[in-house]
Amino acid sequence: MAFKYLSNIPLADARSLFLEALISAGLRSETENIKTVDANHRIAAKAVYAQLSAPHYNSCAMDGIALNASLSYGATDTRPITLQEGQFRWVNTGDPLPAECDAVVMVEDVIEVDNGAIQLFAAAVPWQHIRQIGEDIAQGDMIIPSYTEITPAIQGAMLAAGVLDIEVIKKPVVAVIPTGNELVSPQADPQEGNIIEFNSTIIKGMLQDWGCEAVVYPIVRDEPDLITEAVRNASENCDFVLLNAGSSAGKKDYSVDAIGEIGEVVLHGVAIRPGKPVVLGFASKDRKVVPLVGLPGYPVSAILVMEELIRPAMNLLIKRDDQAKPLVEATVSRRLTSSLKYLEFIRARVGNVNGKLVAVPLNRGAGVVSSFVKADGIIEVPQNTEGYEAGEKVPVSLVRKMKDIDKTLVITGSHDPLIDELIDLMKMKWLDSQVVSSHVGSLGGLMALKRGESHLGGTHLLDEETGEYNKSYVRRYFPEGGVKLINCVYRSQGLMVANGNPLNIASISDLERVNYVNRQKGSGTRILLDYLLKQNNLESAQIKGYEREEITHTAVAAAVASGTADAGMGILAAAKIYDLGFIPLVHEQYDLLVAEKTLAHPEFKRLLAVMQSDEFSQRLEKLGGYQLNNPGEVNL
Amino acid sequence: MAFKYLSNIPLADARSLFLEALISAGLRSETENIKTVDANHRIAAKAVYAQLSAPHYNSCAMDGIALNASLSYGATDTRPITLQEGQFRWVNTGDPLPAECDAVVMVEDVIEVDNGAIQLFAAAVPWQHIRQIGEDIAQGDMIIPSYTEITPAIQGAMLAAGVLDIEVIKKPVVAVIPTGNELVSPQADPQEGNIIEFNSTIIKGMLQDWGCEAVVYPIVRDEPDLITEAVRNASENCDFVLLNAGSSAGKKDYSVDAIGEIGEVVLHGVAIRPGKPVVLGFASKDRKVVPLVGLPGYPVSAILVMEELIRPAMNLLIKRDDQAKPLVEATVSRRLTSSLKYLEFIRARVGNVNGKLVAVPLNRGAGVVSSFVKADGIIEVPQNTEGYEAGEKVPVSLVRKMKDIDKTLVITGSHDPLIDELIDLMKMKWLDSQVVSSHVGSLGGLMALKRGESHLGGTHLLDEETGEYNKSYVRRYFPEGGVKLINCVYRSQGLMVANGNPLNIASISDLERVNYVNRQKGSGTRILLDYLLKQNNLESAQIKGYEREEITHTAVAAAVASGTADAGMGILAAAKIYDLGFIPLVHEQYDLLVAEKTLAHPEFKRLLAVMQSDEFSQRLEKLGGYQLNNPGEVNL
């Protein structure tokens, strides 16, 4: 095992060590000349000066006549001055100002009389209606300083000023080398144990967005010689090498050795989570310095290391300064514990709920790439702190625009695919629609609403005593009111079992003899199970797999479909997706629990409209197992 | 003349009329299937659902052993449990969870004993260190709703979920047709009367940034048949047609007729300035609707019409909602008058000066494309208002990031190329450096500082009585202090004349017999001229061209170089750029006038450091006519 470079250096130190090592080794950008018309988004390698004035001649700014203003002095409404042909010239906008002329009178103010003569009823002011040479840009003026990102307007200004070619920073060519025996190219039907290699696509996209060229190498097997050879080859052909996977201190860590063999390892191991096992180094050959990096294998780790360590190094090459993301302060929705040893990055949903900015932490798993799909921002828990308490104000660096976050309707509660369908229908109808949803179970949604962290949530909480849904919970948790229950649907809940039901599961009592997969605490579906177990005089300890938790209906269905569980409770729609057997148990009421203040939210009004649309009822029919329950009607 | 469609419709009405006309004619997006790996920044045409769960099997999340957790129950530090070969399996991270196992113990917690047996010192919890199937995404889950812009992380999530191809919105192909007899392709040496055609480059860049393909057609001459033919051809081959120039109601307005002939004109003339003479229409053929637009010819007008009218229409095709720019409130630095007839868009510099956000209007000329290079935001003066008073709070839509604006050092004062050189040196040294400068003359800079609109400015104000520079002005305008004068340079001021000085201009008294070009009121150079005229017993009325104003040394030099003026006052550096003759008159002191609060501004400290650098003195040497004057030293 290659522990020799393993360290736990704080992020800021690691960053400066790496940057200083690269600078003192002599890392530098290359430049190239390109046509100005092709330069949008490129970075100017040096200051650009105007080669021509714009306009490059004194130009008439109106259609009309050009004249020497002094000829018009004294003209008034009652005593017009007449000019003969030869004393003035007809001109169009853009024409050069004729010699001896110093003013333009616009055509509307010129009266034509006989023999080509004209009359003026007001005196012209010298230099009126003339775009003087250099009005926009004078030759020799600096149009942009070094390292400016070129925009279409800058291209226009440069072309107007005769700058046809421009020296720009050459896009660094970055090698991305995926490594790992278990990796397979993206495919629809991978085997167990195959890991779909998608990190290179993410990394390539990030690099391109920063202004690099990315070259993705074929997957390299976990063999030291092959990996070293790939790094050597890439370091000779590219400006930057990113080796992905294999940088942990586990059994198959060949990155650090390969980098050490081709170049120099600056450090291995940074005190961040995720992202710890990164390797930072460089090769230096023929006075060219090529950074060599071992990125961690988990996608979330790789993305964070790219942002926190690779981008600052890349900025040395690309001369673009756009890393810092807007920082806001938000109230964290739940306690976040974190190790003293690491600076931790936690993806979070951020919502503006009635003027309060709330950050809801997402799944912290380093393999959960969907957390980056859902994230609005990143919470940083500094090294040497134990985390944050629920309700504490925390700094969040945003990855989504604040104006979008401000508009967003935040749905937090029970999982049902119909929520996603509603969001999709809204987006199709209103392009500017902004809705996010999180699955935390019915009770979790209720608590989030109570804490002011969401606008509404789906809920299906069965009162064991009355058999009624939701109402008694609302009365208990919101004794002072402030919320409304809105009807949505009835849906079919039951046991999802393997296709054909080979174990002949027919009722709750059969769960005693099979492997079960459960839902998380606080979910309506788990409360339903507990209620049904009690009705059947079963204890949870009698159910094998009771402690195995999933947080969505589809994740339970996936567990059953994979054969690692024999049964799980869920809705018919989830069973249908996986072509599972389904034993219906109850027809339950799924409502929306909405803060009263939310009723006026523009996106909520859209949500209601969509809930009542034909398109929604068609989507429900396709999902299966639903029955509309006067959607949008207030039931409490 | 084609006044027939001319109208003056308010912007919002024009926008809805156009969009409604397009929608009711049946404008719709096309879609295409592409590989997910190529989909970065594309827009999903429909909701994307997971085809696979990710992970697609129960996966070991640690290197170590897999076992059935129940085998470890009861193990403690003092009473370890021993498992024989066969009761557990060695696993690596990513391996499938072996059958009958429901937990993983990490290698650090496993003690190997004899014969392949191991010992555990703690009980395993079921499902620990296992990434359960669907932990990230479960098959059937909606990954993104319709019309989501795809990011690298979304690509990763889709590939992880087995989505290899995706239906995206096809990029609309947009024709850009420049028209005009006077237009020439960008070139280094245009003739008088030639107008460099750069609008198409700007428009193409904007379209590409929005997610369109742009096709720039060759320049079409101002002949009705040629223009109509070009529009017909483009409308048959493209999804959107933009005809540029010729949409004003002037002599050569063929756009509206061409559009009317090929399709239908919705409206001609919108109550905005600049941008008024736009033509909006569409063609409809074989159930395909192609918007046809005549854009105004001036670049500033064209850019504003693109943003305000074309982009909303394009959004119907590209399904991207990203038009709205962040709106801030800023104090406008000077009175802005505006016509009641128009909604007016005014480009502005925006600066944060000691916590006060200030908007400084830029040149309003529709031909001044450099105003878009300098602009931080756009002030809108609504229709039916006469404008804003100086000091009034006005809404500004930002085109630059607020975090950059907040950091920016605002220099407002006398023009000297050395300011641009300082900015360039700072940018080269610190990539995150943010400095902007405006040329308003010495007195203008002093007043801006007094009003709290800038951090500092260059100044060279001669006291006619004492012959001393700057100090008496500072004492007069800042009787309570609060500012510092910082030494910078001495520079050579004189008369710029044609190369070889053919008119034998030797002194101020010679100005009586030549064409002069002056600087604007309040500039130190004009004050110097007035002083020298008085010394020579000359009246301004005796100087031909005294009223012709330019606002920079280089613009004056450009006027002299073009032959439209014989002499102008300016610095040697400007004369050198244009290879002009130069008659030195004074060696004047150019200082920086700095608010005391600015002394602590991080960018100001950088500016001082650069002023004292060797690189700066080398740049001054290259410019010519400068002598360093203990730069950075406080002289008052």
Image (cartoon, coloured by chain):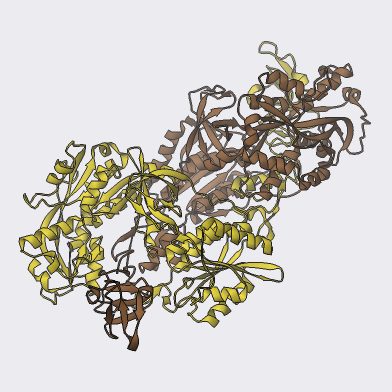
Chain colours: A yellow, B brown
Q: Identify the residue at horizontal 12%, vertical 59% (top origin).
A: A530
Give the percent coordinates (x, y) of residue A117: 73, 22
Q: Is residue A113 above or below residue A573?
A: above
- Is residue B232 at least partly visible in the picture? no
Horizontal relation, residue A564 to residue B496: left or right? left
Tell which of A432 and B284 is nearer to you: A432
For the residue pair A205 and B554, the one nearer the viewer reads as A205
Up-down relation of residue B474 to residue A502 (above or below)? above
Residue at the extreme bottom of the image, as rendered: B115
Horizontal relation, residue A510 to residue A56: left or right: left
* Closer to the camera in the image, A62 or A10: A10
Above-or-below relation of B264 to B39: above
The image shows residue A171 at horizontal and vertical percentages of 62, 61
> Residue B237 or B521: which is nearer the viewer?
B521
Farthest top residue?
A78
Q: Is residue A401 above or below residue A565?
A: above
Q: Quadrant of the C terminus of chain B?
A: top right
Q: Is residue B245 left or right of residue B105?
A: right
In this orientation, does residue B486 appear?
A: yes
